[in-house]
Amino acid sequence: MKVLLIYPCEMAVYRGTRFEFKQTQECLPPLNVAMLAGALREAGHEVRAIDLQIEPGEEDAVIGRVLAAWRPQMVGISFKTPLFDRARELAAMVRRLAPDVLLVGGGVHATYYPRECLESADFDAIVIGEGERTIVRLADGVPPAQIATVATKRDGEIIVPDSITNIGRGCLPGGVRDLDELPYPDWSVLDLDRYPSVSRLFYQASPVGFLETSRGCRAGCVFCCKGVFGSVWRYKSPMRVVDEMQRMLALGFREIEIVDDAFTTDLDRAVAVCEEILRRKLEFPWCCRNGLRVNDVDREFFQIARRAGLHLVAFGLETGNRELLAEMHKGATLEQGRRAARWARQAGLTVMGYFLMGLPGETEQTLQETIDYACSLEIDYVKYNLAVPMPGTRLHEMWKDRMKVTDWAQYNFHVPPRELYEHPNLDWDTLEAYLCKGYRRFYLRGGYLLRQAVRLLRQHRVLVSAKTAWQMWRSG
C-alpha cells in the first residue's frame, strides 16, 4: 500500500510567545514520522512524508501535488493537543482532494479523544497509543474495526475499543515490550538537507537528529500524561542504541538529542551506552534537553557521559517548595535537584532547569521560593512555565471544573493560560508577574552574568546567548 505521512507545523505553537525566536526553538526532522516510515517500509509498503515545518506558506499546495501525482491509499496525520485544529483542517483538505483515501489520525491528543476526533474531523480511523504495529496492520488491509487499538466509524456509528480505558496504565495493547524489536527509523522519507541550521545556544553541530532509547516513565507527576507510552519503562539495549547512533551519523546527522522521558531509569544501562560510544571511538556531541530525573543520576554517570560526548543536560526541577514537590508526586527532593545540577556542572556540562509555576497549592510565598531555589542552583539556563492542565493528566482531572474553554489551541505551555482556566489560589496577573520576575531575577544577576560571559567566551557563543537573554527579558 502507498502511505503518505503528514506532520503539521509545530512552530505554530510558539507564535506570539517569548520562545518564538530561533534561539530557543528549532525545526528538526520529526522522529515519529521516521519511526512509522521504518515500520511500514520493513513490512513492504511504500511511504512518503510531508513535514509542514519546512513548507512555510505552501502546505496546501505541497499536499495537493503529492496526492494528485502519487495517489496514496492511506494518509496518516499525527498531532498534539494545541495542533488539533490544524490537523482537522488538513484532514478536511485531504478528504476533499482524495475522497477515497483511508484517513488516519494519531498522537497523544487522538489517543485521549478518539471519539471527538472522529466526530469533528474527517478521519476514518484513530490510532490509540503507540503506532508502529497498528499502522502496519492498517496498511496490510486489516479492517480498522478488527484492530484493538483503533477507533473507527462503521455504518455511521463511532466504535471506540476497550483499550481506551487502559490509557496511562502500564503498557497499552499496541505497545512494544522489547524495543530492540522495533525497525530502525527511516530518515530517508525526510529531506534532511532542507532543515535549517540549528542555534548554537543549545547545540554544538548541525544537523541534529532525535533519538529514542526508551519509552514510558515510572513516575506519577500530576502534570504529565502517559497516554501513548504508559508507565511501564521499556528500553533499547546499549548495543541497539549505539547502532542507531552510528546509523544516524552515517546519514549526515552531526549531533544527537536523546528525547526519552527517563533515559537514566536504569543507570547501569545509561553508563553502558556511554561505554559503547567510547569503545567504538565515536566522536560526536549529544544532549538531553528533554530532561533527566534528578533522583536517577550520579556523579560517575555525568563524568563518563561527558567523555562520551554529552555536552548539555536539562532537569525537571519544577518548584522550590518541598511540600508542593511531594504533592505533585515527582518522586524527587530539592536536595537531589541541587546535587544533580552540581554533579553535571562539575563534569563540565551546560545545565538547564525547568520549573512550573501555578501548581496546586501555589502561593506567592511558594512562587518566591521557586525563584530563590532556581537562582541558588549551579545551572546555566532556566525555563519557567505556567502550569497547564493538559488532557490525560491528573492535573486536568483535578481542575476539570475550573476549565473555561474547550479551545485546544489554548493548551499551550508557551502562552499564559489565563483564558483556559481559573487557578484556585492566585489570579493571573500575580502568576504572570512572578513568571517575569523569575526570568529577570535569574538572568540579570551580576555574578551569573560574569560567569556566563567567561564560559561563553571560551565556547565562542557570547553573541547568541546575549541576544536570547535580551529577547526573553524584553518579552517578560
Image (cartoon, grey):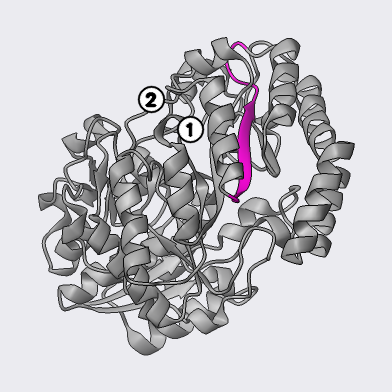
Q: Residue at x 62, y 15 (%)?
A: 321
- Up-down relation of residue 447 to residue 17 (above or below): above
**Residue corresponding to mark 2:** 220
How far across and how far down the image is residue 62, in percent? Answer: 51, 80
Q: Amino acid at mark 2?
A: Gly
Q: Residue at x 45, y 74 (%)?
A: 50
Q: Residue at x 79, y 25 (%)?
A: 434
User: Circle 1 sits in a helix, a strand or a loop, which is it?
Assistant: helix
The magenta region covers 348-361
Seen from the viewer's position, the closer of residues 384 and 392 is 384
Name the image quarter holding residue 123: bottom left
**Residue 415 in sight from this viewpoint:** yes
As measured in the structure, the alpha-carbon distance from the residue carrying label 1 to the one carrying label 2 is: 15 Å
Residue 381, labelled with which disc? none
How far across and how far down the image is residue 167, in percent? Answer: 28, 34
**Residue corresponding to mark 1:** 294
Seen from the viewer's position, the closer of residues 28 and 146 is 28
**Residue 101 in sight from this viewpoint:** no
- Up-down relation of residue 212 to residue 37 (above or below): above
Quadrant housing the C terminus = top right
Q: Amino acid at mark 1?
A: Val
- Up-down relation of residue 449 to residue 232 (above or below): below
User: Circle 2 sits in a helix, a strand or a loop, which is it?
Assistant: loop
How far across and how far down the image is residue 397, in percent? Answer: 44, 20
